[in-house]
């Protein structure tokens, strides 16, 4: 199944938004070291990049796995492919994080994890951290705990006739969220899995079905969706909705869905613009960018500190550039060969 370049560009945007969120505390530390001021920018809710990731993930699972629907070996092949794609880099990042904490604990902001939390992290199982938060050792992995839930549900649904797969996964996600909302708080892992954010996977799957059934929209309408998404992200904090996961779903989830709808409902014709191609290449490395950027940011901060450079704006630009470059290198030299190798070994 051919890649949809605007979707790849959205993946780049999503990862970059998360990186912008995480670079700012380090910029503030650097500014304080130099006696300077730094005012973080929250013009956009940067962590809404995660919501974009989730809607995109729902779309891609249906779009890219269509050949597995109705196949007896579909569930096995699907899980093998997803594990080959997700596990190596995440385990490598988690291991590097643990080693960094062991060798230079001052570089990290978290306490010493328990053996149970470490094991749960490698198994994508929700567990409580020493700070009382439900997150893995490498905290960014909280999103992968949701992704793995989605993959397991999707694989299980592949045993059904093709026309029931998306409906079955959607029903399971809605049931989890409804159980938490009506009978919660539920114990782990169900209380974690039952958060409204998982409904974004269902939104992405629905968009994939619409595209399969021929949905195509003109450029003017698609750009209006983009404008609506941006306006919603800019103004969402001012809506008269109580803060919490349901407002995040209403604002971030809706904006993410509009962006993905705009990306997948266009006509794939002609040669894409160079800028789109460049963004798509970063999108190919978006998983690496998501997992690598904290190391690149913290490493850049240490270099700036050693060099006696405390200009926060310069640091933000340099750290983000280093993160993107590091992600592209990791994607090409580690992620791609590891994924191909594991797929060959598993026959997937």
Image (cartoon, grey):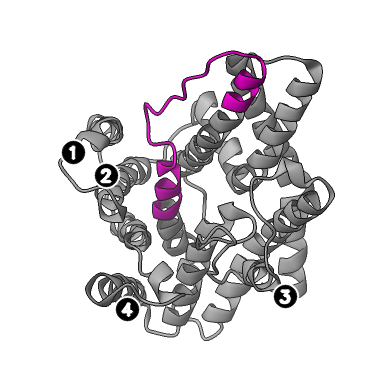
Mark 2 Cα within 10 Å, few/some/many (few <14, many 20+)?
Answer: many
Q: Earlier in the sequence, mark 3 or mark 4?
A: 4
* Residue 228 seen anywhere in this rendered image of the structure: no
Residue drawn 59% across the image and 66% down it:
82
In this rendering, would 343 be left or right of 35?
Answer: right
Q: Residue furthest left?
A: 240
| Label of residue 346 in the image | 3
Sequence order check, earlier mark of 1 and 2: 1
**Camera-nearest residue between 256 and 212:** 256
Q: Are marks 3 and 1 in contact (CB under 8 Å)?
A: no
Viewer-nearest of discs 2 and 4 = 2
Q: Nearer the viewer, residue 202 or 261?
A: 202
Q: Magenta region: which residues? A: 27-55
Which residue ends up furthest to the right in the rendered image? 103
Q: Position of residue 190 (x, y in %)?
A: 41, 75
Q: Which residue is mark 1?
A: 239
Name the residue: 37% across, 62% down: 198
> What whole-number distance in Å separates the C-alpha atoms at marks 1 and 2?
9 Å
Name the quadrant containing residue 274.
top right
Which residue does the image show at 75% across and 56% down from the upper left?
98
Mark 1 closeness class: few <14, some 14–19, many ≥20 residues within 10 Å: few
Q: Are marks 1 and 2 in contact (CB under 8 Å)?
A: yes
Give the residue at mark 4: 164
Q: Which residue is mark 2?
A: 251
Gap between marks 2 and 3, in whole Å? 41 Å
Tell me what residue is drawn at x 66 percent, y 27 percent.
319
Q: Earlier in the sequence, mark 2 or mark 4?
A: 4
Q: CA distance from mark 3 to mark 4?
A: 27 Å
Secondary element at image label 4: helix
């Amino acid at each position: 199944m051919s890649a949809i370049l605007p979707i790849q560009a959205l993946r780049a945007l999503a990862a970059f938004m998360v990186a912008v969120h995480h670079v700012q505390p380090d910029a503030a530390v650097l500014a304080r070291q130099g006696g300077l001021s730094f005012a973080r920018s929250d013009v956009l809710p940067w962590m809404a990049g995660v919501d974009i990731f989730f809607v995109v993930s729902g779309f891609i699972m249906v779009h890219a796995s269509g050949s597995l629907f109705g196949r007896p070996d579909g569930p096995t092949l699907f899980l093998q492919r997803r594990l080959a794609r997700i596990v190596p880099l995440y385990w490598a990042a988690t291991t590097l994080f643990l080693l960094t904490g062991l060798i230079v604990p001052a570089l990290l902001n978290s306490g010493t994890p328990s053996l149970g939390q470490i094991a749960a992290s490698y198994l994508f199982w929700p567990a409580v951290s020493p700070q009382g938060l439900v997150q893995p050792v490498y905290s960014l992995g909280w999103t992968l705990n949701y992704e793995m839930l989605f993959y397991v549900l999707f694989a299980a649904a592949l045993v059904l006739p093709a026309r029931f797969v998306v409906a079955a996964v959607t029903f399971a996600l809605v049931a989890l969220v409804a159980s938490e909302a009506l009978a919660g708080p539920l114990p782990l892992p169900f209380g974690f899995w039952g958060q409204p954010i998982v409904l974004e996977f269902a939104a992405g799957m629905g968009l994939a079905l619409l595209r399969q059934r021929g949905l195509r929209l003109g450029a003017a309408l698609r750009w209006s969706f983009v404008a609506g998404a941006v306006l919603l992200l800019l103004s969402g904090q001012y809506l008269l909705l109580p803060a919490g996961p349901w407002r995040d779903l209403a604002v971030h989830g809706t904006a993410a869905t509009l962006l993905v709808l705009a990306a997948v409902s266009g006509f794939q014709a002609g040669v894409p613009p160079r800028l789109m191609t460049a963004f798509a290449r970063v999108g190919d490395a978006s998983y690496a960018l998501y997992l690598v950027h904290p190391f690149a940011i913290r490493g850049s901060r240490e270099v700036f500190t050693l060099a006696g450079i405390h200009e926060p704006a310069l640091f933000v630009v340099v750290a983000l550039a280093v993160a993107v470059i590091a992600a592209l290198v990791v994607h090409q030299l580690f992620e791609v060969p590891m994924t191909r190798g594991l797929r060959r070994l598993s026959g997937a």
